[in-house]
Amino acid sequence: MVETFQQTFGAPLWLAVVLASGLKVTLILVGGSLGMMFLTWYERRAIAYMQDRRGPNRVGPQGLLQPIAEAIKTMTKEDTTPLEADRIVHFLAPVVMLAATVLTFAIIPWGNLFPSDLSVGVLFFVAVGGLHTLGMLMAGWGSNNKFALLGGMRGVAQMVSYEIPQVMAVIPIVLMTGTMSMQRIVEAQSGFGGLAWNVFTPVGLFAFVLFFIASLAEGERTPFDIPEADSEIVAGYMTEYTGMKFAVFYLANYMTNLAICFITTSIFLGGGNGPGVNELGGFLGGFLSLIYFFIKALFLFFIMVLIRATVPRLRVDQLMGFAWKFLLPLVLVNILSSALWVSITRWDQQAQIFTTWFGAPGTADAPNFIRLGVAVAVTVAINLGALVMVMGLNNRASQEHMRATDEELALGL
Amino acid sequence: MNYIVVVIFLLLAAITLVSGVMVVTVKNIIHSALWLIASFIGVAALYLLMEAEFLAVVQILVYAGAVSILVLFAIMLTRHVTGEGTRMLYERWWVALLVALVLFGAVIVPTIWNQGANWDAAATAAQSSITAFGEDAAPGTAVASTINIGESFMREYLLPFEIASLLLLMALIGAIVIAFEEPTSRRRVLTLAEEHALKQRGIVEPRDAEGAVMPTIEAEQAL
């Protein structure tokens, strides 16, 4: 893009860079906000149909203009700050939150279009997404309200716990593709006629499920929407916010969800890869990849909505137990099995014995199906075994606790 | 010479330093923790300016995202430590200043001692290596990539790495030992259905965690 500005318009280098970056940032911001508007409408309509209602259907065709009406409504509302609140922190909290969210969009590959290719893209997403927590804490503390503070504390405890399984769930993919750049991860999934998605390997499938669950918690989606549990602590950290500031929180939340869908799509579901993208190539291929990308991301968002409509909220202790006792061991085991996967499918010089047993490692044109089969069998066995074991351990512990309590109750202690 | 880079560097350095000073001068302890985060992010931006992407992202992930959040969390859990009205300076402030200067000197003097001779060479290399956007940096000034860092952890710095991991493991186990609680020492909260079933069986009236009899729903309604 920089070259285009330089060659077509004869702009100097610095101006070309500024123009190109400005254009990208504008596109990301506009795309993100429009996407968020669409998502609010989509979620409300979808959840309404799941609950046998109609949802918003009056403003515009099928209610599509409802988000715009709501944006006008929030903008015209009075913006109040509590008298005892810390004014600066209270004001900065939504800004920090939105900034952290928008930054994550910098590394999202839109189909075959890349705003920027950071060599540590995956890590960047998690790190900057973690700054989200900061806005939550600032809002909770700055509001000088006990519900807000409670919500902020809950949010921080949740985010810090779920960040760990989220980062670790990506490590198998980094091991398998050998890079952390989003662009290369997407490119690595373009084989087999555009269907070599990471989710089709046992390790990738396991990592996908774990990553998506941890991301649900990071995006405060329903089974984990404890920071803003409206039936318990009013609206959590957003309690003291009105008008546009509240809307900014809302925007940040939905943009985070959108980013999570996009990132999960890129890492696990092949991004814009699909049948026909490589064959078409050029502009048409890029367009097709964009369509594939959006379909996959929207499908993931649909799953989020489905979960919201069906799964009740967790209790705080259940939330913590789930992250530390269930997700974390499984994620660790998955890293082990992904290392086995890489060694079995690829090692040649490092361990000659693999070559003598299963033959030379396959290439893109001639995959070695024996090696693949063995790798699939080994990783499936390990992952399933770990799943059964962890579930059994968790079940036994909770049942023992229940039994002990029951005995105690029966004795009237 | 690329003046834009210099201007950006000066801006970032100013942000980092100013927020660092604010950390120690601001009275409200929460504000000073927030300034600390700003300072961490400034350092991360400086790393990014040096094209050390991995280091920058880890700085944000670990320091801005985890350490400072835990600091804030700990402050908020302990009541009445807003620090409004406490004195900031005591009589022996100059001792603290001295210690800080000595520590800073311990870092900066060996660096200048060892690398001072290379100063001019490094400056010219830096000037010539600032390339146009999209081009690769000159080979002499390449920054360690993620792969280099990972390999050095597993090869030349294996022992420090293992010792650090062991230390962290010990801290983890210690934290668990301190926080551990006998599973049966606190009773699970009964659901309404369970409470009802227990009463139906005539076994027990519900009690709270201390063992005092809790009023039943009927008794509450009668009041």
Image (tube, coloured by chain):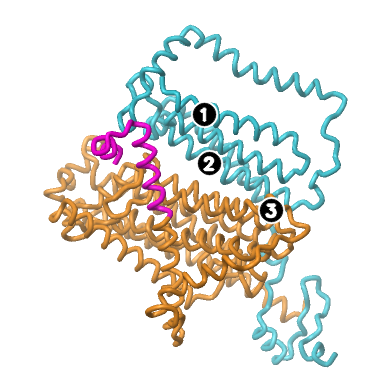
Chain colours: A orange, B cyan
Answer yes or no: do the residues labelled 3 and 2 have beta carbons within 8 Å? Answer: no
Of all chains, the one bearing label 2 is: B
Label 2, secondary structure: give it: helix
User: Splitting the image into 4 quarters, where does residue A57 fall?
Assistant: bottom left
Establish if A319 lies above or below A379: below
Location of mark 3 (residue): B179
In this rendering, position of residue B86 left or right of residue B203: right
Q: Please name the residue shown 41% across and 68% down the image.
A: A38
Q: Where is residue A287 in the image (x, y as percent from the top left)?
A: 23, 58
How far, Cα to Cα, is label 3 from label 1?
28 Å
Of all chains, the one bearing label 3 is: B
Is any part of residue A211 visible from this angle?
no
- The amino acid marked with disc number 1 is Pro
Answer yes or no: do the residues labelled 3 and 1 have beta carbons within 8 Å? Answer: no
Location of mark 2 (residue): B60
Indicate which disc, 2 or 1, sits on the residue closer to the N terminus: 2
Q: Depth check: A186 or A162 in front?
A: A186
Q: Where is residue A237 in the image (x, y as percent from the top left)?
A: 64, 62
Location of mark 1 (residue): B160
Q: Where is residue B93 in the image (x, y as percent from the top left)?
A: 82, 24
Q: Please name the residue shown 54% across and 66% down the image.
A: A224
Of all chains, the one bearing label 1 is: B
How far, Cα to Cα, is label 2 from label 1?
23 Å
Query: Which residues make up the magenta segment?
Result: A1-29
- The amino acid marked with disc number 3 is Ala
